Amino acid sequence: MAQFRATVVVTLQPDVLDPAGDATAQVLRHMGYRVADVRIGKSIEVRLEAEDRAEAQALAHKMAASLLANPVMETFSVQVEEL
Amino acid sequence: MAQFRATVVVTLQPDVLDPAGDATAQVLRHMGYRVADVRIGKSIEVRLEAEDRAEAQALAHKMAASLLANPVMETFSVQVEEL
Amino acid sequence: MRVAVVTFPGSNCDDDTVRALTALGVSPVRVGHRAQDLSTVDAAILPGGFSYGDYLRGGALAAQAPVIESLRAEVASRQLPVLGICNGFQILAEARLLPGALRPNRQGTFRSAWQTIRVTRASPLFWGLEEGELLRLPIAHGEGAYYLPPGQLAAVFGNDQAWLQYVSEDGLLHTEANPNGSVANLAGVIVGSVAGLMPHPERAMADYLGSADGARLLQAWLSGISRRDGHAR
Amino acid sequence: MRASDVGLTDAEYAEICRLMGRAPNALELGLFGALWSEHCSYKNSRALLRRLPHEGPDVVAGPGGNAGVVRLTDSWEVAFKIESHNHPSYVEPVQGAATGVGGILRDIIAMGARPIAVADLLRFGTDVHSHHLRQGVVRGIGLYGNAIGIPTVTGDLAYSDTYATNPLVNVLAVGLRRPEHAIGASTAKPGQLLVLLGQRTGRDGIHGASLLASQDFHGSEHDSMRPTVQVGDPFLGKLLMEVTLTAVERGWVGALQDLGAAGLTSAVAELSESSGVGATLWLDRVPLRQAAMTPYEIMLSETQERMLMAIDADRWDDLKALADEQEILATVIGVVEPGEMIRLLWQSEVHAEVSARWLVRGCPRREVTDEEWEGFRRPVPRPRVQAVAPGRGGARDLKSLLLDVLAHPDVRDRAFIYQQYDSTIQTRTVWGPEHDVAVLKLHEEPVGVVLSVFGTGQWASVDPYAGAAAAVIHAVSRLAALGAECLGITDGINAGNPDKAESFGQLGGLVAGVADAARALGIPVTGGNVSLHNETAGEPIWPTVMIGAVGRLADAAHPVADVVREAGARLYLLNPAPLDLGGSVVESLAGGASPYSLGPLADYRRALDAMSQSVRSGLVEAVRVVGRGGLAAALVRLLLPAPPSLGIAVTLDEDTDDAKRGRLFNEGVGQWVVALRPTCEPAFLRLCEAAQVPVCRLGAVTDVAALSIDGRVQWTRAELLAAWRPLG
Ligand SMILES: Nc1ncnc2c1ncn2[C@@H]1O[C@H](COP(=O)(O)OP(=O)(O)O)[C@@H](O)[C@H]1O
Ligand SMILES: [Mg+2]
């Protein structure tokens, strides 16, 4: 068994409203930045055990699909590195 | 002027407790995963205008340092890609 | 006495705060988040609420508003008394007018309850509020866990900045009395003329609402300002 | 596009062609599909709802508007209504529940009232998934209510497997308005501008409420047309509320309508139809969140946080300045026209032309004959007079039975839920969610609004009529316990597919039960909501009705206690019910489900009057309504928050064990446990006798810190508390 760090980035689907992103963009504009838009997602780091990298990737993918992201409004990507 | 997408990943400093991450880890363990720990950060995508990549990187860094992350408890990293 | 109630888009305890001050005989002036000039006010309250929806982090977006720079200037130049309640406390912390940060409650959920608070350090800002006094006040927040970076806790206690703490009903300090995971049960801090607290004194203005201790706290603040400025009210 | 694509039948399509004198184009068909959906047209329930009583001396606005309105004092009116968000909450519990709260708040605001309270009425299954749904729903309700600054002051929660794949999320909101600020949708005048306020329109929830909430949800079958999940933005909701109410207070608003189910289509059609006008909309002016949205998408989007306002043209600059100040969008998107035709223009080209009347009133509706109605009113035949059969909780000894009842999910303490809701903001909350009725005192006057909510579960599962009537009586009983006057009720009906005879019968039974109870008690039903098609794979939920009752309390700062205060007080049971465990928690613990037992409705009115009379005459020291868990649970609730030295000793008249259980655990409505000073006893007994309401003596408040029954069974307060409020 080896240790891996999986980083699951969860983002809202493009058509889903992101009020937090909109409000943040608004304030950035008030601060003088030329911002078209802001979308706020999550970056979730999971340290897990697996036989190998492929298994770690598969496990993290399963965690993301079943718990970390809500498929009706979010999408996710998974990156794995060995520790 | 060109369009860029900056991705600012905001993470809690390592010694700051992350109750939400701990609770997620607990649920993942109940689901049968061998998880050592979970840390939840934000992944913030900002679409912005800048002269070039270097300026976009600098602008995004300033936004992160002054607003998107709170240095009392968080750290951040910035990645920029041209659109 | 001119007390400013400073509102931001999404503030929602401003009416309650205005009502509370009015009941104590002060007619406050409302000041919006774009205000540049606070030179004519004697004190300012940042009421509770969800400024900018509490999006990103509680208080973070409001801390960028122009009025914060005006407050900062008045505090620096003439020690303007400033009181931040709940979201107002979060804004002051995000603006670095107070140390530390307010993080999501340890239990991960919003918490609304009646809570006993102890005055840990008396302050001239709150005239007549004695050390060791207990107050019963409502709390209502999702991000109320007070956090200080390593090493700062001793400084906050050492410099008499640790103002209020969550305690049990009989006044004892222990972890079970901590409603949100705040470091050292801290419910409020004071630095110079700036004070912040998570509980809501403006909601505890009469026995029929559950407690009148909030009136005591706000009255103490007004008394502190009058004595300091020699104002007749 | 075919009729079936928008959920219409061939017969309905033919009717559309007949009304229009031509075939509708795709956009027009979409408008009909939305407004002729079950959710918007009430095609299966309207005839039933017409039989609800809705008149009363204090009714200002009955059903028909966005919310009912009753008179509280000469200078204050109360708007209130219940709304369901069941299906969206199953798909995405946090946002589904949050947008449910936002939606009902905008209904209140659309009456010109400022929301002062929210209540949540929830039903979930008992499995792990239901547990997650509940957590998400509670988070969502708090997310919206807390952030917009409206206290959530009371609620109702129960569990059954019948709700596992179809949870019920019904939300009720209450608002206050000055009579001079009354506004509605029915006062638009030709020439006025139509202004859309708030969020940019996106592709959220297209077909959401109209289609999905109006058909059975078969999981994956709908995936292709699954709408984009609607996300609530309480921050924008707050700004929109302030702009809207300020405009109303300044007298700028000609007519007002929120955008809810079926979005702009419904808003424009309702406003036009109820005002007797037509409208022209310039759809290319609607501010969009996504590029290349079609007129169809714009008209059917259910993007949250939007309001439609009709204003005189010379008010536009004022309104625009106000909206700019609050940093929200305000856009003129059309104009009110004479006549009744709604014209939708895209870059000056007409894309649709339909009559508001056809859209709102044209849908063929199911009629209900008197004979059918009589059938709904007939209670389900009862198998036995006394349902206290052996084995029904009989296996357990009394000591552990009460602890099991207290620990039952339908009875146990709710603090773990309501602590997630801000209940003290706005500083009117004299009694919040730790009591079983909420008391909100006006700032300006001693008078208060009292709000009590209650829904059926098992009660209506076998006999919808009796269960629904009982729920009305129970909600009103809580007002009577304070001596408050009931001004009106709102009802949220939740049932299965009305095309099936069985479900339609249950729907009819629920409405008939509400109607008969309300009429018998002399209480108007000022509005409500109907949610049908609550079924999964052909299995309907238990027919369930949620009731919200609003009352007036003269001295709101001093409600009569719901906790005993002094040793020596005498305890009585006012209006004891038959010893029948039908529909009770004890019965369900034993796995039974028999019909709910209900007495003659007229008797309940006498009991309610006697109860409020006793309180108003100052005879009562403390009182609690018998509710879930029966008399035994009511006694425990009367005791637990009391000073720690006090106890209660009860002696029952019943002689057999079964009868004692029947007394302690029946959940018959219209019963109260009353604590009296001994000196008040004679006057109280005289009052009850004069009112012909039976009472029975139960015992007394003691200074032994325990609950004891017949001196034989005893529970310490710590035991009771540990069962009712388990740690962790
Ligand atoms: N169960 C019911 N009892 C009484 N009135 C009802 C009921 N259901 C709906 N109504 C009334 O029918 C009208 C339309 O309801 P609805 O479409 O839910 O309104 P909205 O779209 O504004 O939420 C409202 O006035 C409502 O009060
Ligand atoms: Mg409406």
Image (cartoon, coloured by chain):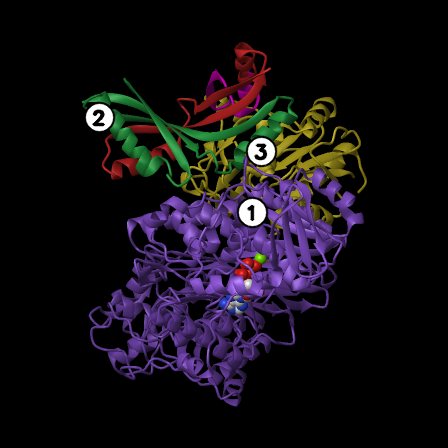
Chain colours: A green, B red, C yellow, D purple
Mark 2 CB lies closer than 8 A to ligand 1: no
Query: Is D719 above or below relative to D244?
Result: below
- What numbered label is drawn on residue D435? none
Towards the viewer: D41 or C108: D41
Which chain does the numbered disc 2 sit on?
A
Q: Residue at x 39, y 48 (%)?
A: D91
Instruction: Tell me, yes or no, whether the two marked residues, 1 and 2, touch with CB atoms within 8 Å.
Output: no
- Circle 3: residue type: Ala
- Identify residue type, mark 1: Leu
Q: Is residue C32 left or right of residue D656?
A: right
Picture coordinates of residue C188, whole percent (x, y): 56, 35
Which residue is located at x 65 percent, y 37 percent? C8
Between marks 1 and 2, how big is the CA–CA gap? 52 Å
Q: Which residue bears the numbered disc 3?
A: A23
Q: Is mark 3 within 8 Å of ligand 2?
A: no
Where residue D616 appears, x then y in whole percent? Answer: 59, 76
Q: Is residue B82 in the magenta section?
A: yes
Which three-letter amino acid code belongs to the residue tagged 2? Glu
The answer for which chain carries disc 1 is: C
Taking the image as shown, residue D10 lies to the left or right of residue D197, namely left
Q: Look at discs 1 and 3 and give the one toward the viewer.
A: 3
Work out whether disc 1 and disc 3 sit on a shared chain: no
Position of C103 relative to D91 (above/below): above
Along the line of sight, the residue nearer the viewer: C199 or D241: D241
| Residue holding disc 1 | C137
Residue stretch rendered in magenta on the structure: B62-83
Tell me whether the residue at label 2 lies in contact with that at label 3, contact meaning CB atoms closer than 8 angstroms.
no
The residue under label 2 is A55
SS state under label 3: helix
